[in-house]
Image (spheres, helix red, strand yellow):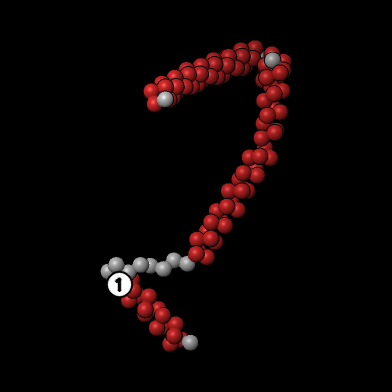
Amino acid sequence: MLEAAKQLEGATDDAGAKPGARAVVRASEHSSWLHDYAVAQSGLLFAVVAQAPIVLLLTYFLLASGTHFRRKLVGLVGPSLTRKKDAVHILDEINVQIQRFLLSMLISNILVGIGIWLAFKRWA
């Protein structure tokens, strides 16, 4: 058995040294790697799917609450007037940055849509 193993090992070493020789890769090694990858990614997918309803509900309630959330957050900051002003300023800045982001996304999506429309119109 040991001699047969040594002969096989020598044959594979010789095949690797010959020019134009192909390396033999077993399918089980690929399927094992693919299986491990699929299991890891399915776990991540499950985590995202499990957390998505919670994120959607929180987003809905934050948007539906309007200024109530803002007042609650300013009330949690503390009794100091300067801290409350800072909190209001931070919330205003967040609001402005979100508006700018959404505006830039709208403009870029419109430009992409026009570009795709022109491309399809040219070839149609």
Residue 94 picture quarter: top right
Local packing at callout 1 (Cα closer than 10 Å; few below 14, some 14-19, many 20+) is few
The residue that appears at 60% across and 53% down in the rendered structure is: 39
Residue in the picture at 66% in, 35% down: 52
Residue 76 in percent (x, y) is at: 70, 21
Residue 32 position in % (x across, y down): 54, 61
Residue at 42% in and 22% down: 121
Q: Quadrant of the C terminus?
A: top left
| Percent x, y of residue 93 | 55, 16
Residue 19 sits in which quadrant? bottom left
Q: In the orientation shown, which residue stands out farthest toward the left?
A: 19
Does residue 22 appear in this view?
Answer: yes
Taking the view exactly as shown, the residue that stands out farthest to the front is 124
Indicate the position of residue 55 as horizontal and vertical percent values.
67, 31
Q: Is residue 57 left or right of residue 103?
A: right
Query: In the visual, does 24 lie left or right of 57?
Result: left
How many numbered markers are drawn? 1
Q: Residue at x 44, y 82 (%)?
A: 5
SS for callout 1: helix
Residue beneath disc 1 = 17
* Of 114 and 18, the residue lying toward us: 114
Can residue 86 be seen here? The reply is no
User: Closest to the observer: 3 or 95?
Assistant: 3
Give the amino acid at mark 1. Ala
- Using residue 57 as the reference point, say whether residue 106 is left or right of it: left
